[in-house]
C-alpha cells in the first residue's frame, strides 16, 4: 500500500483507539489525541523508544521497521490499581515511499481482569476439592492396609469418609447453583409468588437444623404480604442460606428473627418494595469483612465455616439471585451485637 503523509494524518486523527505512526527514522511523526492523552503530551518528532520504553513493544516496532509485516505486544500504562493493559499492534505502512510502522493500542484491561478472575476461581475450586479428596484417598489406603481387620477403626473411618464425600457433594451442588443463577441473571422472573408463604415453608424445612442448634425463630410481619415477581426455588435458596448462616454463626441457643416490612417507595428500586431482615443474636462480623462477604469462598473464619459444613459460596449465590430479581442485599453488623442481612425485593 502506498499513501502520502496527509492521508495518513487524516485517517489516524479520525481513529478512536490511540494510534501513532513511526517513520523510517524511528520518529513518531503522526499521533492522534487518544495517543497523546495516553502517552502524555507532545509526541511529534520524538524517537519512539524514548516514548514507549517497554522492551517488548520496542522489539515489535523494530521488527516491523526492519521488514516484518506486523507484530503485537502488550503495553502497560499507569500503576497498581490504576494500571491499564493495552495490546499494541504494529503494522508496516509505506508512506511517501518510505517504510514505517503504524502502531495502534487496544485497551484489554477488562479482558485481562476477567481472565485473572477465572484463573483465581479455578484455583480456589481445586483447592476446596483437594482437601476432602486427599482425606478420602488417605482413608481408602488405611482401610485397605493397616485397618483392614479392625472393625472399630473401619466404622470410624467410614463415617469420616462419608462426611468428606458430603462436603464435596455440597461444593459441587453450590457450584452448579452458582453457574445456573449467573447464566440466567439477565432474565427477570415473571411468575408471582407470596413471600409470606415462602418464608414459612423455608423455616419449616430448616426445622431439624434449628432444633440441632437450639435456635428459636421468630417470624414478624409475614401475614398478608402482597405477591411479588420471583423465582420460588431461588428465593427459597436465598432465605435458606441466610437463615442457615444466622443459625450456624449466631451460636447455639440463639434467636433468629425474620421481619418483613413493606416500603411504599424504595429510592434504589424506584418504587414499592419488600424488605426482609434476617437478624441473629450472634457475635457479629467485624466491619472490615462486610464488603467482601459475598465474594466466592470469602469466609471470616475458614475453619469455623468448614466445621459447620460450609462451602463459602452461600452468600455469593444469594447475591446473584437477588440481582436477578433486581433487588438489593444490605448487611449490617456490630461485633457483639449480632448481624442483620436485609433483602430488598421490588414489589412491582
Ligand atoms: N449471620 C452471620 N454471622 C456471622 N458471620 C456470618 C454470618 N453469615 C455469614 N457469615 C460469614 O460469612 C462467610 C460466608 O458465608 P457463606 O457464603 O454463607 O459461606 P459459608 O456459610 O459456607 O461459610 C461465613 O463463612 C461467615 O464467616
Ligand atoms: Mg452459608
Image (tube, rainbow, N blue to C red):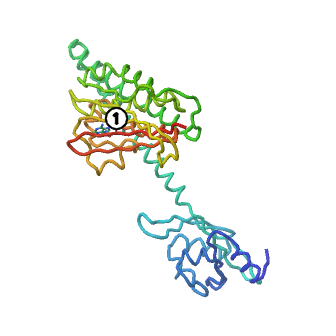
- Crowdedness of circle 1 by 10 Å Cα count: few (<14), some, many (20+)? many
Q: Is residue 291 above or below residue 132?
A: below
Question: How far from the left and from the top, in percent, is residue 114?
Answer: 51, 52
Left or right of 99 in this view: 262 = left
Question: For the view shown, which residue lies furthest in the bottom direction?
Answer: 45
Please tell me which residue lies in front, 338 or 135: 338
Q: Is residue 119 above or below residue 55?
A: above
Residue at point 55%, 38% (across, down): 348
Q: Is residue 310 above or below residue 213?
A: below
Q: Quadrant of ligand 1?
A: top left
Q: Is residue 70 above or below residue 29?
A: above
Q: Quadrant of the N terminus?
A: bottom right
Question: How far from the left and from the top, in percent, is residue 85?
Answer: 51, 64
Question: How far from the left and from the top, in percent, is residue 259?
Answer: 35, 33
Question: How far from the left and from the top, in percent, is residue 333?
Answer: 28, 44
Q: How many marks?
A: 1
Residue behind mark 1: 278
For label 1, being within 8 Å of ligand 1 is answered: yes
Query: Which quadrant holds residue 315?
Result: top left
Please tell me which residue lies in front, 268 or 105: 268
Residue at point 50%, 27% (across, down): 232
Please tell me which residue lies in front, 164 or 133: 164
Q: Could you say whether the residue bearing mark 1 is in a helix, strand or loop?
A: strand
Left or right of 21 in this view: 264 = left
Question: For the view shown, which residue lies furthest in the right direction?
Answer: 2
Left or right of 182 in this view: 301 = left
Left or right of 73 in this view: 153 = left
Amino acid at each position: 500500500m502506498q499513501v502520502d503523509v496527509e492521508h495518513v494524518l487524516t485517517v489516524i486523527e479520525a481513529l478512536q483507539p490511540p494510534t501513532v505512526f513511526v517513520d523510517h527514522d524511528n520518529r513518531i511523526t503522526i499521533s492522534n489525541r487518544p495517543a497523546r492523552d495516553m502517552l502524555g503530551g507532545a509526541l511529534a518528532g520524538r524517537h519512539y523508544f524514548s516514548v514507549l520504553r517497554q522492551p517488548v513493544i520496542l522489539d515489535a516496532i523494530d521488527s516491523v521497521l526492519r521488514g516484518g509485516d506486523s507484530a503485537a505486544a502488550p503495553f502497560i500504562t499507569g500503576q497498581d490499581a490504576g494500571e491499564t493493559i493495552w495490546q499494541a499492534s504494529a503494522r508496516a505502512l509505506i508512506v511517501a515511499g518510505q517504510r514505517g510502522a503504524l502502531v495502534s493500542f487496544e485497551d484489554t484491561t477488562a479482558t485481562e481482569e476477567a481472565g485473572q478472575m477465572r484463573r483465581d476461581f479455578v484455583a480456589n475450586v481445586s483447592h476446596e476439592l483437594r482437601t476432602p479428596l486427599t482425606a478420602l484417598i488417605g482413608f481408602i489406603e488405611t482401610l485397605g492396609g493397616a485397618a483392614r481387620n479392625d472393625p472399630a477403626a473401619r466404622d470410624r473411618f467410614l463415617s469420616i469418609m462419608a462426611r468428606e464425600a458430603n462436603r464435596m457433594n455440597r461444593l459441587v451442588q453450590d457450584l452448579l447453583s452458582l453457574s445456573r443463577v449467573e447464566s440466567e441473571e439477565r432474565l427477570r422472573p415473571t411468575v408471582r409468588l407470596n413471600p409470606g408463604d415462602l418464608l414459612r415453608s423455608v423455616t419449616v424445612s430448616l426445622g431439624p437444623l434449628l432444633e440441632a442448634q437450639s435456635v428459636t425463630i421468630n417470624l414478624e410481619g409475614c401475614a398478608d404480604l402482597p405477591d411479588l415477581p420471583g423465582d420460588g426455588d431461588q428465593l427459597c435458596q436465598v432465605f435458606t442460606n441466610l437463615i442457615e448462616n444466622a443459625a450456624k454463626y449466631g451460636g447455639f441457643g440463639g434467636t433468629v428473627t425474620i421481619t418483613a416490612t413493606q416500603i411504599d417507595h424504595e429510592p434504589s428500586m424506584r418504587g414499592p418494595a419488600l424488605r426482609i431482615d434476617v437478624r441473629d443474636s450472634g457475635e457479629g462480623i467485624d466491619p472490615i469483612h462486610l464488603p467482601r462477604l459475598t465474594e466466592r469462598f470469602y469466609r471470616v473464619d475458614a475453619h469455623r465455616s468448614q466445621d459447620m459444613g460450609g462451602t463459602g459460596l452461600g452468600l455469593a449465590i444469594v447475591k446473584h439471585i437477588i440481582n436477578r430479581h433486581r433487588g438489593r442485599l444490605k448487611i449490617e453488623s456490630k461485633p457483639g451485637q449480632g448481624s442483620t442481612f436485609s433483602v430488598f425485593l421490588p414489589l412491582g
